[in-house]
């Protein structure tokens, strides 16, 4: 077992058995005498890998048959524009539920291509208002939300139930595969890979096939969902190694027992950490319990002058990636699927020990 406990927000920890397998197979994949990075993305062997990865992801998330799964590039950030370009026209309004930094970036980018409307923001208590209180537009092209805000540590604990005719689009970058989700409640889901899927460089999009073709002409070919769908995500050279690693992560998740098991583990890890923070006056966890993320736990030292020392000592103890995002400061522990309960226990012991010494 590694002596380092990696709480990085992304790129983030990958499951150790996945790294071991990739290491073992690196120079000689499937007895071919070459690595998976060195073969054609159009070879039968890579096509089999591609299909296997899609089948595993489809099974893990119980993706309905009328949805396509695309393996793209450009990160979640490109999806801010790509969703708008494919699902709206220039005269449309797009609704956004904004619960943190990524939602703000999503509306800013989409507003370059249509009218972005903030239909909901966090209320005075830091909670997501009920859907009945959202100011939805008359005929929004779609409504976008961020199920888990990675920087702010705010998570939706239930999927917002919108009127049937409003397609729901979700940026699941930092909570996909952390628990089961009902894909059919969404028109489109996207996620950058570098948290719960695999290494950076791959972006997964799951979309209802009826959303294609794009609602406007003239968009770049590689930003057109239908182009990727028809080419089985092989319109141009894909990030083959990232795709391979994602496939190994999906297999690992299936071997763990799937997303019900992951949800249970993730709940346990988050509870352990929030309980320790709430029990102490030395630390504060500012997000109200009903909106707390199970993936990104945001906290602060009450005496912030101790933060630099806290981080240095944490790193010396093998606890990495705990600095909050540069835009908000403070501390953040990301508890993605590959982070074990044991690592969270080590973090809690460190929190307690530091407080005992410096509190
Ligand atoms: N949305 C969310 C929720 C994220 O956490 C991130 C990255 N941390 C992004 C979007 C942007 O992703 P990328 O860097 O892959 O474009």
Image (cartoon, helix red, strand yellow):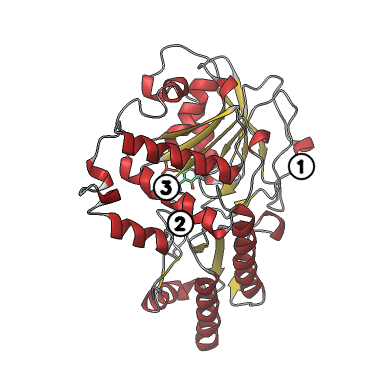
Label pair 2/1, CB-CB below 8 angstroms: no
Q: Is mark 2 within 8 Å of ligand 1?
A: yes
Q: In which quarter of the image is the C terminus?
A: bottom right
| Sequence order check, earlier mark of 2 and 1 | 2
First along the sequence among labels 2 and 3: 2
Please identify the quarter of the rendering in which residue 21 is found: bottom left
Q: Quadrant of residue 17?
A: bottom left
Circle 1 is placed at which residue position? Answer: 130
Q: Where is residue 269 in the image (x, y as percent from the top left)?
A: 59, 67
Find out whether the residues at labels 2 and 3 contact each other: C-beta distance under 8 Å.
no
- Secondary structure under tag 3 reads helix
Secondary structure beneath dot 1 equals: loop
Q: From the viewer's perspective, is residue 12 above or below residue 37?
A: below
Kindly tell me whether residue 272 is visible in this rendering: yes
Instruction: Return the residue nearer the eye: 21 or 336.
Output: 21
Residue situated furthest front in the rendering: 31
Q: Which of pointers 3 and 1 indicates the residue nearer the eye?
A: 3
Q: Name the residue under label 2.
A: 9
């Amino acid at each position: 077992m590694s002596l380092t406990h990696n709480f990085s927000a992304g790129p983030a920890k990958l499951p150790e058995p996945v790294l071991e397998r990739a290491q073992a197979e690196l120079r000689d994949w499937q007895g071919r005498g070459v690595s998976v990075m060195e073969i054609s993305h159009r070879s039968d062997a890579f096509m089999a890998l591609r299909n296997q990865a899609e089948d595993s992801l489809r099974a893990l998330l119980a993706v309905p048959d009328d949805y396509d799964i695309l393996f793209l590039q450009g990160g979640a950030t490109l999806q801010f524009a790509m969703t708008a370009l494919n699902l709206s026209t220039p005269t449309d309004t797009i609704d956004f539920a904004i619960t943190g930094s990524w939602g703000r970036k999503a509306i800013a980018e989409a507003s370059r291509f249509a009218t972005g409307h903030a239909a909901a923001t966090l209320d005075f208590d830091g909670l997501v208002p009920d859907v009945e209180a959202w100011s939805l537009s008359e005929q929004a092209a779609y409504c976008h939300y961020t199920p888990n805000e990675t920087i702010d540590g705010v998570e939706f604990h239930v999927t917002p139930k919108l009127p049937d005719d409003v397609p729901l689009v979700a940026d699941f970058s930092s909570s996909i595969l952390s628990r089961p989700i009902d894909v059919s409640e969404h028109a489109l889901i996207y996620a950058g890979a570098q948290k719960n899927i695999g290494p950076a460089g791959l972006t997964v999009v799951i979309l209802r096939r009826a959303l294609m073709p794009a609602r406007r002409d003239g968009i770049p070919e590689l930003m057109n969902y239908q182009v990727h769908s028809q080419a089985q995500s092989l319109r141009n050279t894909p990030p083959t190694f990232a795709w391979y690693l994602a496939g190994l992560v999906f297999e690992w998740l299936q071997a763990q027992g799937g997303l019900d098991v992951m949800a249970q583990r993730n709940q346990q890890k988050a509870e352990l950490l929030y309980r320790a923070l709430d029990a102490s006056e030395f630390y504060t966890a500012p997000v109200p319990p009903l909106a707390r993320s199970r993936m990104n736990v945001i906290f602060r030292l009450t005496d912030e002058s101790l933060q630099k020392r806290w981080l240095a000592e944490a790193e010396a103890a093998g606890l990495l990636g705990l600095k909050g995002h540069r835009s908000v400061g403070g501390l953040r522990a990301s508890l993605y699927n590959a982070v074990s309960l044991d690592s969270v226990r080590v973090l809690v012991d460190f929190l307690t020990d530091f407080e005992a010494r410096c509190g």
